[in-house]
Amino acid sequence: MEFLKCIAMIFRDATYNDLSQGLDLFCQRYELVENIEVLLEEEPRDQLPTVVQRIAAFAMADMSFVEEVLEGKDRSHIQACFSSVFMLPPKEEMRDLKPYLYFMTMKAVDSMLVALVLNSPASQVSEKMQDIFQMLLTFSTSERASVRERAVGRMRLLSFLLTNYSSLKADPNEDRDDSGAEIQMPILGQLLGHLLLFLSFKEEETSCLALDTLCFLFQFKCQQHCVTVPEENAQLQEDWEAEVASLTSSSRAPHITKLFAEHLQPSDRTDMVLVFIEALTDSSTFDKKAARNMLDMVKRDCDFWLVDVPKITSCIHKTLGCINTAPARQRVVSLIVWMADKCPGEVVSTLLSIAPPADSTALALWEVMFSVPQTLQNVLKELHIQLQDRHRRVLHTCWEDTSILRLAILASNDLQDEEFAPMYLIMRFLRQRRPKVLSLVLRGLMTLSEREEMARKMKVMLPDLSWVLQYGNNVIKTKALVVFRNVMAQLEREEASPIAVVLAKLLLPFFDDELSQLRKFSISLFRDLMKMVVENDKRKMKNTVQLGLLPLFFHMSDQVQSVAKVAREALLDAAELLKWKQLGHLVQTQQTWRTGESLLERDRSRAQELLRQSLP
């Protein structure tokens, strides 16, 4: 205590009597700043604040009046003060334990911050503010409400100083009005993003502090705008005063964002979007609904907000793996789809440069873009262009041997039917054995095959799709079946009939798959195939359909209702193909037990086979 009091006394007297020469060397020799930090580190952080913390903050404030004493050291000292004070227990827990000590400690911290700003040369105020705000942002995302409240409270203080910048003095001889220096706030976008999200913390004092801070920041930006347009100064002054009143009366984040919008630089807007995206991660302390609402606002005016496509793409890639709730993921991926539509070159080049082909998050983003027809076309064209550029050696080396490049080449060229088949037979990219890449290729083919003319060309792929059905995983098989359905739907019946007979037999094992989506889709496709056969192939199809009757009967009671429904419809179609009227009647009238008996009575020679099928 005596040590800290001596420091405060020395610097206070030196400033008052203009005897500060040599104090910087004195501080360096005896490592005064470093020793204060050590004292703060030793103070307990889980109980009532001590007098040491308060006196240390006041000593720091007095030291800041002497130039060069804290040069290069103020950041670490502020960090030590914040860590020591912000992590104390909530003030409610100290209500019966001399609360004045807590409030005096916070007042000392505030005095320290004010002194650091007031006593900085005009040319350094921007950097000083930037550093302090950055430290406060780190504390503001704490899981503890008391820490958030203290950090945002200090933001409010600094924002108040910003609005009164024209009246601050760097020293007795320097008038900031005459210095020509203007405070720059590169951190403004991050700051606004956090504060807007804090408005949703209605149960905390943090929400009110955030609103006050936003009001001060808005006044600061408006004042700057008035200075830059002096001939309209009076009208601008009147306008922004009205807007400040509007901001104060409404704490709705979208309304406040709209008021700020015209005062924001593109970099500010980008930083705000990044904050909203990162707020959706599972570990974030922000309210996820509030973050989703802000991204909905962004999506309504994408041209205004999504200005730095590479930066936003990189952020989405970095955070998507940490966002596991479906609504939150949907908000984020919708942004990547919009950017891929408007700026496919920037999205493609960014993803290629930041992520290797096997990166799971990158593959998830590619798959999202491959799911939308127009987006897929734009992205494949860009992939074709960029991956063919031999000067991009790193990208080319990573991607030229994968199936993605071959898919891009095939899809981005408007090939005629007679050209498409030979081209594919050379590439054969469906023989890709890496599941993640094959899954992505199939996602692209699913989207491409939605176009009738492209689906007709894909007939040449059907043998390889059959190979995929035998060796792929469940997700891959489901995607392959979608492509099969789209392609088969575009073939003439005589052309589709023999393929349908072969494919129907391949589908039977999928009826009992553990993945309900695969069960449902295989049974649905089985229904379609039964209707595609011509007279010459009906006998073969009937033999396959008889093998599927019992599995379809069992799946009429599937726990997944959508599977049960499609199984019942397929059994009705099977009864029609086989011309088994009694079976159709029993299924139609939902006589489940009699339906099973009917299958056995129809052909008792198959009793052994039916029993074998029943065991699983």
Image (tube, rainbow, N blue to C red):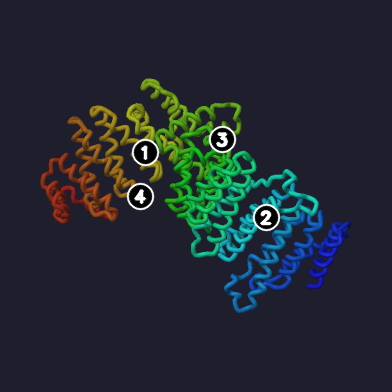
The residue labelled by disc 4 is 515
Q: Of label 4 and label 2, which has the lower sequence position?
A: 2
Visible residue check, residue 442: no
Q: CA distance from mark 4 to mark 2?
A: 53 Å
Q: Of label 2 and label 1, which has the lower sequence position?
A: 2
x 21%, y 48%: residue: 568
Q: CA distance from mark 1 to mark 3?
A: 26 Å
Q: Residues within 10 Å of mark 4 (few under 14, many from 20)?
A: few
x 32%, y 29%: residue: 452
Name the amino acid, label 4.
Leu
The mark lying in front, picked from 2 and 1, is 2
The C terminus is located in which quarter? bottom left
Q: CA distance from mark 1 to mark 4?
A: 15 Å
Q: Quadrant of residue 521?
A: top left
Q: Which numbered disc covers residue 378?
A: none
- State the residue in front, 30 or 518: 30
Name the amino acid, label 1.
Ala
Q: Position of residue 339 (x, y in %)?
A: 49, 37
Q: Of label 4 and label 3, which has the lower sequence position?
A: 3
The residue labelled by disc 3 is 398
Taking the image as shown, residue 131 lies to the left or right of residue 23, namely: left
Q: Quadrant of residue 206?
A: bottom right
Q: Position of residue 195 (x, y in %)?
A: 55, 55
Q: Are marks 4 and 3 in contact (CB under 8 Å)?
A: no
